[in-house]
Amino acid sequence: MIEIDISGEERELLKNLIAQLRELVLSTSSEGPLDPSVRRLFPAAHAENQELEREYQKTMRDQLLEKRLSNLDTVELSLFDKELEPETLSAWITIINDLRLVLGTHLDVSEEEELSIADQNSPDHHQRAIYHYLSHLLGELVDVASI
């Protein structure tokens, strides 16, 4: 068992973010374009060939969606637990990373640029703070998982 020591406020934040992520991924379809904010959750396999890419997405997107929804269920069910099984910790890592990817895409974060939260007057300050929190939490979870 792995102890997870985060506050009730953090758990409530995660609960809200998970609900939003669930709604967003459920709005995707195996046909048609992806919402840009979830594009990184359903990566292209054949970017150079639209026909192959359409077929790949048609085949794989439902499987990826099913796995994501299963991980969302696992995290939701364990969100207020004080200890996690290793398999549950793995679902947490996946979902926290998914949340970071979606939010990072929305904020246009790149690997080359570190996202700053210094400007409290910025209209996206709150989202930037959440992105930093998720990054920190993900790092902590990965560290614990690798012990």
Image: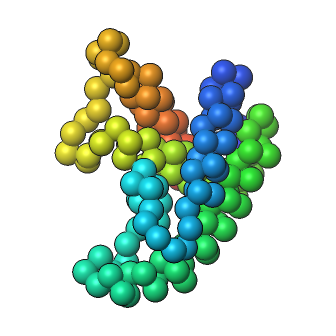
Q: Residue at x 29, y 32 (%)?
A: 115
When the figure is inspected, residue 145 is found, relative to residue 14, above or below; the finding is below
Q: Residue extending furthest front?
A: 32
Residue 142 seen: no
Residue 13 lies, in percent from the top left, at: 62, 29
Front residue (pair 126, 146): 126
Horizontally, is 113 left or right of 43 in the view? left
Front residue (pair 80, 50): 50
Residue 43 lies, in percent from the top left, at: 41, 68
Q: Residue at x 61, y 74 (%)?
A: 63
Q: Quadrant of residue 4?
A: top right
Residue 106 lies, in percent from the top left, at: 38, 42
Horizontally, is 142 left or right of 80 in the view? left
Q: Residue at x 52, y 80 (%)?
A: 58
Front residue (pair 51, 70): 51
When the figure is inspected, residue 69 is found, relative to residue 32, above or below; the finding is above
Residue 146 lies, in percent from the top left, at: 53, 52
Q: Residue extending furthest top?
A: 121
When the figure is inspected, residue 125 is found, relative to residue 68, above or below; the finding is above
Front residue (pair 143, 42): 42
